[in-house]
Amino acid sequence: MGGQMFLSIISITLIVLQTQHMTAKRLPNFVHVCKRSDPQLEKCLLQTIESLRPELPNGIPKMQIPVLEPMVIPMVAVNRNEDALKVKATIKDIQAWGGSKFVLNNLK
């Protein structure tokens, strides 16, 4: 689950970085655009992600951000064969809530 959340956060961050290449007409008006030349780029990106937060539970189709409440994961396969723990499982149709309530302290 943590991996999916991490991928979602990375996806959002990458989308934010790419917004400077999109025209304002193509972006939803609630999106704050950062410039790479901004001396406080990290702060700007954090503000942009926070501006997206209210929209995340329902997703932002225009930006190809999927619905996060609930986050639907079709399948997870676990195959661990360690001496201390042996697990083989396939979990299907997972729904997870709370994905839009992530906390970002900084970006590096």
Image (spheres, helix red, strand yellow):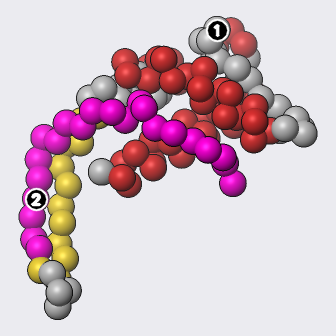
Residue at coordinates 45% horizontally, 48% vertically from top-left?
7
Q: Which mark is residue 90?
A: 2
Which amino acid type is shown beneath numbered disc 1?
Asn
Residues tagged 1 and 2 counted as in contact (Cβ below 8 A) = no
What is the C-alpha distance between the residues marked 1 and 2?
41 Å
Magenta stretch encompasses residue 90: yes
- Left or right, residue 93 beside residue 26: left
In the rendered image, the quadrant that contains the C terminus is bottom right
Give the secondary structure at mark 1: loop
- Residue drawn at point x = 70 percent, y = 34 percent: 45
Q: Which residue is mark 1?
A: 29
Q: Nearer the viewer, residue 51 or 25?
A: 51
- The stretch of residues the image draws in magenta is 87-108
Residue 40 to residue 68: above or below:
below
* Visible residue check, residue 11: no
Q: Label 2's element?
A: strand
- Residue 5 spot, x, y in % from top left: 40, 45
Residue 48 found in image quarter: top right
Q: Earlier in the sequence, mark 1 or mark 2?
A: 1
* Residue 103 - label: none
Inspect the image, locate mark 2, and give the three-letter code of the amino acid beneath it. Thr
Q: Residue at x 80, y 38 (%)?
A: 41
Crowding at mark 2 (Cα within 10 Å: few <14, some 14-19, many 20+):
few
Q: Report if residue 57 is visible in the image.
A: yes
